[in-house]
Amino acid sequence: MRAIAVFATLSVAVLITSSARAQDAAAGEKVFAKCKICHVADKDQNKVGPSLHGVIGRTAGTHPGFKYSPAMIEAGKSGVVWDEPTLTKYLHDPKAMVKGTKMAFPGLKDDKDIANVIAYLEQESKK
């Protein structure tokens, strides 16, 4: 009986944790409005910043036709690939992760906003 109670408690904790971290692509699209000045996510088009369409799984500093900073090119050569953990770290503080990046954006401070933007980028990458 005690094992069932422990299992039930752990199950509830997992459900609460996963729903707290749930990602909302629609909310991410709204947050991404801050990024649209420089980036496009719904099609493959470079602007002031590189296209973010298909960014998930891309090696940093490699999108064709965009002139990256030497720091971003070096980040890619050293193994940075854009996935959820690397995007989370980068979006929180771009200049701390890639010292010398050309991106002027100071970053997103709300972890939920970051998770939602990543969900939006994932959704757009699948189109």
Image (cartoon, grey):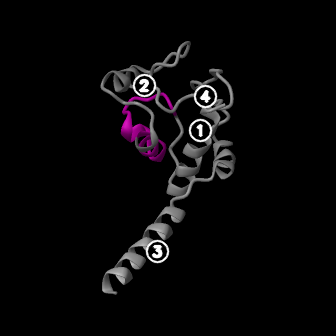
Residue occupying the point 54% across, 39% down: 105
Task: Give how far apart the Cα atoms at labels 1 and 4 are.
Answer: 7 Å
Question: Picture coordinates of residue 127 (x, y %)?
Answer: 66, 31
Q: Mark 4 points at which residue?
A: 53
Question: What range is drawn magenta here?
Answer: 86-103
- Say above or below: 76 vs 93: above
- Disc tally is 4
- Residue at the front extreme? 1
- Of callouts 4 and 3, the N-terminal one: 3
Name the N-terminal-most of marks 4 and 2: 4
| C-alpha gap between disc 4 and disc 3 | 36 Å
The residue to which callout 3 is attached is 12
Q: Earlier in the sequence, mark 1 or mark 4?
A: 4
Q: N-terminal of the two: label 1 or label 3?
A: 3
* Label placed on residue 59: 2
Q: Residue at x 67, y 45 (%)?
A: 29
Which kind of residue does numbered mark 4 sit on? His
The type of residue carrying mark 1 is: Leu
Disc 2 from disc 3: Cα separation? 37 Å
Residue to which mark 1 is pinned: 121
What separation in Å lies between label 1 and label 3 (alpha carbons)? 29 Å
Badge 2 or badge 3: first in the primary sequence: 3
* SS at badge 3: helix
Question: Which residue is at a point 37% across and 24% down the rendered structure image?
Answer: 76
| Magenta span contains residue 90 | yes
Amino acid identity at mark 3: Val
Say which label, 2 or 1, has the lower sequence index.
2
Q: Where is residue 9 in the image (x, y as percent from the top left)?
A: 40, 78
Q: Is residue 110 visible?
A: no
Q: Name the secondary structure under disc 2.
A: loop
Marks 1 and 4 close (CB-CB < 8 Å): no
